[in-house]
Image (cartoon, grey):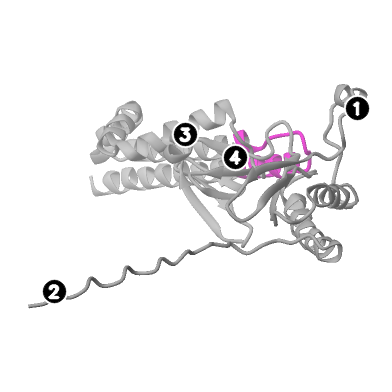
Amino acid sequence: MLIAYLAGSTRTLIAVSVILLLTVLVTGIVRFLATRAIRHASQHDHYDPTSLLFAKRIVSGGLYVVGIGCALAQIPKLEVLGHSMLAGAGVLTLVAGLASQQVLSNIMSGVLIVIFKPFRLHDRITVNGMTGTVEDMNLRQIVLCDPENNRIVIPNAVVSGNALVNSHHTDPRVCTPIEIGIGYASDIDTALAIMIAEVAGHRLHIDARTPAQVQAGEPLVVARVTALGDSAVMLKVWPWANDPATGFVMRCDLLKSIKQRFDAEGVEIPFPQRTISYREPPAPAASRSI
């Protein structure tokens, strides 16, 4: 009886070991193939690897659950648990989701993001006031890399529940308006001409006009008076660049060059000014004679 028991235990141990080994091996192969496909897809500009990355994690988690359930089913004392784990995986997932609604919300939001694709990997987006390039997305969150190389982790539910700005959606070009105030004594036409010339001559500025607008004779650069402020006449020009990063560099260059041209042409950029009037206090009333 002892020999039969030991033989049965050995067979159970071997079966559990083989199942777990196969689970790890199959999952590793799936993850390896998916990683290769993602790396290959990332080399093409018009292919989105987001779906592959999401599917890799879903399939890997499912394989582990099935493998562990099959291994537990080989142990007599845990056979019921193993079968329950395999048969009730969906129920357990639902119960766990109900116990943690935030986690379920993030998972469902992640699925919807993958289906409708409001953004892709490597897109530059702004969510809830935070801007960065999409580096990764998983079941719970997305990871953004901001211009200072910080990593911003945002739950999927927050992404789905807020307005999102995608700088790369269909058209990566960006307009970076520049608004400058000049003094009321300065010549407006001279200031507008300087702003237009500096924008048109910048190496990073692009022609964003449609063929119809070009044919209609619309100007390459538009600059207008936008407001009459308390201390300045507000002027605004609309330069265009190929992408947000290029637009930022161009805007910095234009602020410097426009300021230098204004100084050379005698166009004043005034400080805030206030006119204060002092009122003489009334003369004290004559004292009553007693």
N-terminal of the pair, mark 3 or mark 2, is: 3
Q: Position of residue 82 (x, y in %)?
A: 31, 35
Majority SS type along the magenta span? helix
* Callout 1 secondary element: loop
Residue drawn at x 36%, y 48% as measured from the top left: 10
Q: Which residue is mark 1?
A: 217
* Callout 2 secondary element: loop
Q: Is residue 41 magenta?
A: yes
Q: Position of residue 241 (x, y in %)?
A: 79, 45
Viewer-nearest of discs 3 and 2: 2
Q: Which residue is mark 3?
A: 160
* Callout 3 secondary element: helix
Q: Position of residue 15 (x, y in %)?
A: 42, 42
Foreground residue among 63 and 263: 263
Q: Around disc 4, counting alpha carbons within 10 Å, would you say few (fewer than 14), some (14 to 19), or many (20 or more)?
A: many
Question: How many marks can you see?
Answer: 4
N-terminal of the pair, mark 1 or mark 4, is: 4
N-terminal of the pair, mark 4 or mark 3, is: 4
| The quadrant where residue 253 appears | bottom right
**Which dot marks residue 30?**
none
Foreground residue among 232 and 19: 232
Q: Are marks 1 and 2 in contact (CB under 8 Å)?
A: no
| Magenta extent | 29-51
